[in-house]
């Protein structure tokens, strides 16, 4: 009898566990357990600032050091509309966001990586265009993120920020309104893919600012955190610092760290300026943030939760993001000066005059930094810790606000020129044939 009761109890417990497991599995599916793995390769550039989210490309690449309209152009193809988002490259596809002001249509474009041929165009929004903003801004300044199965894009439209997911063949999968948005200078925050989530932000002066994580498969909001009532333009960046993965956000007079999985605030300090554009970088111990309004501000902050600001200065690194390598912090100031500091102390190591005004962020490939100004001139200089060494200058087109993408030993650059008196964007593939 005891054996029978024991067997029955085990059987009932097993049935209960199986039922519970099934329910949990169903709940996991509803909550996003079916988002699938992130499937991108080292030869891809799947989101803003590249595979490691730090502006550093694979060191074994060999992109050309020289190019022009007539030299080392593998292909070029016209891009409709206008946008400042960077090319996202995954597999054989290149994705760009664009906005056509004549028809008031915001779209995602897809091109063939090998030939430059446009494969498809998907309309995301029609109408609802904002009529003001900074003259340097666009209504397609976000860089798409790709998880290998879907692409994600943020657009400001109709006074709100929306995140949209598309399949790799351009089918719209879902669209989620993040928050209402009061335009100040513009909007350019790019989505960040992390595990089962796509994380987006929308700081603005309307009092409805938010940072939110959506399920990649469904668009359902998994967590959301309110933000202060200030305009700000940074993108969410996830980095492994001080022994754990942290989601960093600077601006609104704060430097903030969140747990990227659940949105809980890990730590926060008053240590930024109000309006920031650049994306946070790290040396594994410190994080480096910068801003440009109402003051110029660059700071190094310990990311262990202590809130310690290790050093700071008043350099104007407002729009182009910085890079870190081997104990040194590199930057291109908006006004066209390359800088190098010791990352642990902030001691200036060198500075070098480039030229022009910079909005695109520099990209590091091996020992070289590539920095493109707004007039389309790319400066190539070495990441040497002892002196500034310029090794090349390359002119392409007339107008560049988008950060170039480096992968597979090729450079994908979004640039514009005047054709018959009208601005025409082009997507260039720069490389050796």
Image (cartoon, helix red, strand yellow):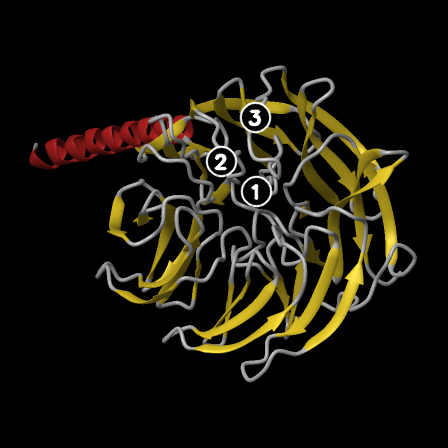
Q: The residue tagged with tag 3: helix, strand or loop?
A: loop
The Cα–Cα distance between marks 1 and 3, rounded to whole angstroms, is 33 Å
Q: Nearer the viewer, residue 431 or 12?
A: 431
Of the residues under marks 2 and 3, which one precedes in the sequence? Answer: 2
| Foreground tag (2 vs 3) | 3
- The N terminus lies in quadrant: top left
In this rendering, position of residue 143 left or right of residue 293? right
Q: Is residue 81 visible?
A: yes
In this rendering, position of residue 302 left or right of residue 91? left
**Residue extending furthest toward the left:** 2
Identify residue for label 1. 147
- Where residue 211 sits, quadrant-wise, is top left
Q: The residue tagged with tag 2: helix, strand or loop?
A: loop
- Where residue 230 sits, quadrant-wise, is top left
Residue 337 at x, y percent in the picture:
59, 65
Q: Is residue 178 above or below residue 427?
A: above
Residue 124 at x, y percent in the picture:
63, 22
- The C terminus lies in quadrant: bottom right
Is disc 2 in contact with disc 1, using a CB cutoff of under 8 Å?
A: yes
| Foreground tag (1 vs 3) | 3
| Residue for point 57% across, 33% down | 153
> How many neighbours does mark 2 have within 10 angstroms: few (below 14), some (14-19), or many (20 or more)?
some
| Residue for point 13% across, 32% down | 4
Of the residues under marks 2 and 1, which one precedes in the sequence? Answer: 2
Identify residue for label 3. 132
- Give residue 229's mark: none
Identify residue for label 2. 35
In this rendering, position of residue 391 left or right of residue 348? right
Q: Is residue 25 visible?
A: no
**Residue extending furthest toward the bottom:** 386
């Amino acid at each position: 009898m005891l054996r029978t009761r024991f067997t029955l109890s085990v059987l009932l417990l097993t049935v209960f566990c199986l039922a519970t497991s099934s329910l949990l599995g169903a709940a996991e599916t509803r909550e996003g357990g079916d988002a699938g793995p992130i499937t991108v390769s080292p030869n891809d550039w799947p989101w803003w600032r590249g595979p490691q989210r730090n502006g550093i490309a694979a060191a074994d690449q060999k992109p050309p050091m020289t190019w022009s309209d007539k030299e080392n152009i593998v292909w070029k193809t016209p891009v409709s509309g206008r946008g400042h988002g960077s090319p996202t490259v995954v597999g054989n596809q290149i994705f760009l966001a664009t906005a056509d002001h004549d028809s008031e249509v915001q779209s995602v474009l897809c091109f063939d990586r090998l030939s430059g041929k446009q494969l498809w165009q998907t309309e995301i929004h029609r109408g609802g265009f904002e009529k003001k903003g900074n003259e340097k801004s666009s209504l397609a300044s976000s860089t798409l993120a790709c998880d290998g199965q879907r692409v994600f894009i943020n657009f400001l439209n109709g006074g709100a920020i929306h995140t949209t997911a598309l399949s790799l063949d351009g089918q719209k999968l879902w669209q989620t309104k993040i928050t209402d948005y009061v335009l100040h200078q513009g909007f350019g925050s790019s989505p960040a893919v992390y595990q089962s989530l796509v994380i987006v932000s929308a700081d603005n002066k309307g009092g409805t600012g938010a940072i939110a994580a959506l399920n990649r498969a469904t668009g359902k909001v998994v967590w959301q955190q309110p933000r202060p009532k200030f305009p700000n333009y940074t993108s969410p960046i996830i980095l492994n610092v001080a022994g754990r993965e942290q989601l960093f956000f600077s601006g609104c007079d704060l430097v903030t760290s969140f747990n990227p999985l659940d949105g809980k605030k890990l730590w926060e300090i008053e240590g930024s300026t109000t309006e920031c554009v650049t994306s946070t970088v790290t040396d594994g111990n410190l994080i480096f943030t910068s801003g440009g309004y109402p003051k110029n501000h660059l700071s190094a902050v310990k990311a262990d939760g202590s809130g310690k600001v290790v050093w700071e200065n008043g350099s104007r690194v407002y729009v182009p993001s910085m890079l870190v390598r081997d104990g040194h912090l590199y930057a291109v100031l908006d006004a066209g000066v390359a800088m190098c500091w010791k990352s642990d102390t902030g001691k200036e190591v060198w500075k070098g005059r480039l030229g022009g005004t910079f909005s695109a962020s520099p990209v590091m490939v091996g020992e070289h930094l590539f920095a493109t100004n707004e007039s389309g001139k790319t400066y190539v200089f070495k990441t040497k810790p002892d002196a500034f060494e310029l090794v090349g200058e390359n002119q392409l087109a007339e107008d560049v606000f988008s950060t170039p993408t480096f992968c597979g030993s090729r450079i994908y650059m979004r640039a514009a020129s005047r054709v018959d008196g009208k601005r025409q964007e082009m997507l260039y593939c720069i490389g050796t044939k």
